[in-house]
Image (cartoon, rainbow, N blue to C red):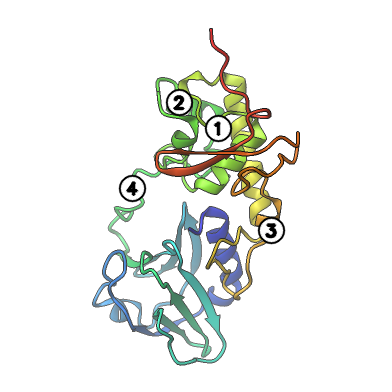
Amino acid sequence: MPELPEVETVRAGLEPHLLHRRLVACQVYQPRLRYPVPADLAVRLYQQTIHQLSRRGKYLLLHCASGTLLIHLGMSGSLRLLRKLEPAGRHDQVDLLLDDGTCLRFHDPRRFGLLLWQPAGQGEHPLLVGLGPEPLSSAFTTEVLARACNTSRQAIKVRLMDSRVVVGVGNIYANEALFVAGIDPRRPAASLTRAELRQLVRAVKQVLRLAIAAGGTTLRDFVDGSGQPGYFSQQLRVYGREDEPCRRCQRPIVQCRLAQRSTYFCPHCQPPLASP
């Protein structure tokens, strides 16, 4: 599933091509996505100028004068910028045509993505309400994480992936950040010391920045707006490396499941909480 670095890579790649461009048509080939594509989306977008591209968690936001288009890539979605309109393929769901003749095409084989419209003046979209701070912003601090973990019995990896605590830290990057911080992902969140929480906040920011610089992590279908894959997979320390040697100590990486998600860690570099 595309995570924060993948969506940020897509946003940055598309911004020079979409900013200040006018939408002249919207063709919906398949309205049945995770949520139905609004029946009036083409009318809503017609002649709207994109004046800002932003990201909130894993949502890409195209801001126009009359509202905002929310795009989520789901599990297998991608956005492609076509210089020349090509016939839509089987899994091409929506085309956004721009005034310079280019086309932004939404491709989603599994149809778990979404395109929704939020009119201006109606506040934040319900899907964005209640989201935690952005992990790369100054709002994500040791104090914020400490308050979220103070009395929680959840495993720290599960807590870190809760979008109400911090947005966009998905499974891949939670595994990687906990390794960098030297914290066993199974530990109860409340067991972490202030120093460990501080180190974890730093690790989250470090791992996400490195992933964005590498263009994200390619797993199955992810590509950026120009069709190029991400290369952070070459830098993964633990994720997907069960039984392979730890890049730090050479002992084998272990895999388990937490909250139904595959979890990878090094028992030597991420020691469990010592018994009292």
Looking at the rendered image, the disc whose residue lies closer to the viewer, 1 or 2, is 2
The residue singled out by tag 2 in the image is 149
Residues under numbered marks 4 and 3 in contact, where contact means CB atoms less than 8 Å apart: no
Q: Which badge, 4 or 3, is on the more N-terminal residue?
A: 4
Callout 2, which amino acid? Cys
How far from the left and from the top, in percent, is residue 157? 49, 35
Residue found farthest to the top:
276
- Classed neighbour count for the residue bearing mark 4: other residues with Cα under 10 Å, few (<14), some (14–19), many (≥20): few
Secondary structure beneath label 3: loop
Separation (CA) of disc 2 from disc 4: 21 Å
Separation (CA) of disc 1 from disc 2: 12 Å
Q: State the residue in front, 136 or 171.
A: 171
Task: Identify the residue at horizontal 49%, vertical 70% (top origin).
Answer: 78
Rendering quarter of residue 177 = top right
Residues under numbered marks 4 and 1 in contact, where contact means CB atoms less than 8 Å apart: no
The residue singled out by tag 3 in the image is 214
Q: Which badge, 1 or 2, is on the more N-terminal residue?
A: 1
The residue singled out by tag 1 in the image is 141
Separation (CA) of disc 4 from disc 3: 30 Å
In the depicted structure, whether residue 90 falls above or below residue 166: below
How far from the left and from the top, in percent, is residue 244? 68, 44
- Classed neighbour count for the residue bearing mark 2: other residues with Cα under 10 Å, few (<14), some (14–19), many (≥20): many
Looking at the rendered image, the disc whose residue lies closer to the viewer, 4 or 3, is 3
Callout 3, which amino acid? Ala
The residue singled out by tag 4 in the image is 129
Task: Identify the residue at horizontal 32%, vertical 56% (top origin).
Answer: 125
Secondary structure beneath label 2: helix
Callout 1, which amino acid? Thr
